[in-house]
Amino acid sequence: MSILLDEATRVLVQGLTGREGSFHARIMREYGTRIVGGVTPGKGGTDHDGIPVFDTVAEARDATGAEASIIFVPRSSAVDSAAEAIRAGLRLLVCTTDGIPVHDMLLLRAMARESGCTLVGPNCPGVISPGKSKLGFMPSHVYVQGSVGVIAKSGSLSYEVAYELTRAGLGQSTVVGIGGDPVKGCSFVDLLPMFADDPGTRVIVLLGEIGGSEEEGAARWMERNRLPKPVIAYVVGRTAPPSLKMGHPGTLFVWDGGRHEGKVERLRAAGALIAGSPWDVAAVARAEMPGEVRE
Amino acid sequence: MWLLPEQVARVLRECGLGEASASVPEAWLAVEIEPGNGVVRLRVAQWQDSPPDILRTRSSAVTIDPRYGLWDNQSREVMVKAGFRRWNRESPQLLRRLWEVFREYELLLLETGLSLGEEGFCYARGRMLCDDNAIDRNERLERFRDPVAGEPAHAMKAHGIDYVELRGEIGLLSVGAGETMATMDLLDASGGRAACFMDCSGGFGADAVTAALRRACMLSGVRVMLVNIFGGVTRVDGVAESILAALERIPGFPLPLVIRLEGTGASRGRELLAAKGLPSHTALRDAVEAAVALAGQGAA
């Protein structure tokens, strides 16, 4: 099992006919993603690599029954494209675009919540349910199907951890890269309940980093909701000074928690198992799931 | 990116907030985006001479829906909750303007001290953090783009200052590499950390000090500014004059300032500062402890 996305999910690619869009659409399709249409304003009615192209998301949804979309459009029109997908009532939207202004994200986030759309990103690698489908640009070959659910702020760290899990003989149910921007579509607290309810997920991995207060929010959620499965947390930035602005703008905010020790302690107190490295995540997961390992 | 103090002053003037006030403000207020969940809040607290990080935890708050903006009834509600009943009538218009500025400048944080003067509201210790992602598309931010932000060390060198950005809370300006490093070590031993290493060996003139203080304001973690001078060839009364001139050029300098003056002309220098209401320390240990204590309050 998995969350958000599986082999049956019908997806659209917004910006399908562009360079990025057609490149990643081909790779996603090869992986098994059920791409049912593309959206490029002005190219409706044409066909791209055998995929029908539509002018609008609403049109594409009506013609194909699509419920999810991924955006590969230039930054300048990414926010509008995301709004279009949300307005069309899609239930899952992946926005990989980086550099989206925070005030635009405030509005998109509010829109998405109101219409019940899970917006993943921006500035993220997307979602993969290994062996079934992927909606994003993560390196598929490091993932195998299994029962570890992963939520990660840092994209590369999610690759690292998937790689180590796979090496340790542990597959993944779904891996979600939520991105590191200060205002994002969904975060740990939005995805934890989904993984908690997913019978195919036996262990949940949270990959956090200094800055912001989302790890603390996850800890609060865990304290209020008795999780029927273990949570492993790995927070990076231990030796980075709390005020240092790293690659992710979220780390600018340090006044409300945000420090490494605080996050780790909150998560530990909430019952999370703390890991100190990607291979440590795999080792802890392995210890939590005897009998799961495939050599 | 933090806006420079004079940029903050310009923006606050647009809100109808006269000039910077030297007196301790009565209220602290902030509009901010909570990272992660994207919740926008207006926070108000009685100032009580605490650092903003403390005031934040004590503040009264209302949540602003970015789609509808700040309602006047929300402003009244939060002012009353924070104990500013007598401001109730004047504040909604001002707060609405602050919210509009927050939107127009695409800020992540706007915070300022506020007091009610005879001529209306005035402010102190304003700070604004803008969204780096928005700089390219927002004309208002474009004109604030910091031309030296890319190469701070290079720009500081032009003022005769050796500059290294560190990761602490205490902006540090001193003269002489050995003295500056020693101060850093002492801060660390007392439980504080320097936010930057600024060795003003090229001459402690008003321009250099202005550049140094401006630079310190832009460091994201900085909570306190420590100026430590043991003057030898550097005349300390000249140092005091430079500090005063710099503060005049940076209206509403947002950081608590801890100054330690010793050496040639030090008593005259301390007198000059005291005449303008600026206390100073003689012993380095006192200054270090004062700076660490102020920084620690903010971190608690």
Image: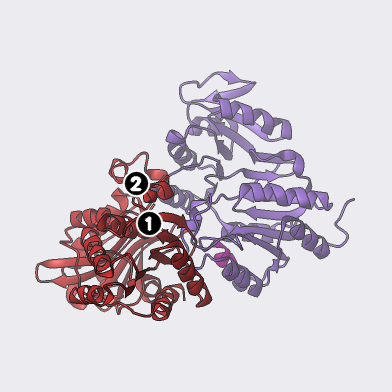
- Which residue appears at 70% of the width and 64% of the height? A231
Q: Residues within 10 Å of mark 2 (few under 14, many from 20)?
A: some
B238 to the left or right of B40: left
Chain at tag 2: B
Look at the numbered disc 2 and give the secondary structure of its residue: loop
**In the rendering, what colour is chain B?**
red
Look at the numbered disc 1 and give the secondary structure of its residue: loop
Q: Residues within 10 Å of mark 1 (few under 14, many from 20)?
A: some
Residue A8 in sight in this render: no
Residue A267 in sight in this render: yes
Chain shaded purple: A
- Toward the viewer: B179 or A71? B179
Most common SS among magenta residues: helix
Which labelled disc corresponds to residue B218? 1
- Distance (Cα) linking label 1 and label 2: 10 Å
- Which residue appears at 70% of the width and 43% of the height? A6
Q: Which residues are magenta?
A: A214-219
Number of numbered markers: 2
Residue B272 magenta-highlighted: no
Q: Are marks 1 and 2 in contact (CB under 8 Å)?
A: yes
Q: Mark 2 = which residue? A: B146
Residue extending furthest toward the top: A46
For residue B247, above or below residue A43: below
B88 to the left or right of A62: left
**Amino acid type at mark 2:** Asp
**Amino acid type at mark 1:** Met
Residue A278 drawn at (x, y percent) = 72, 55
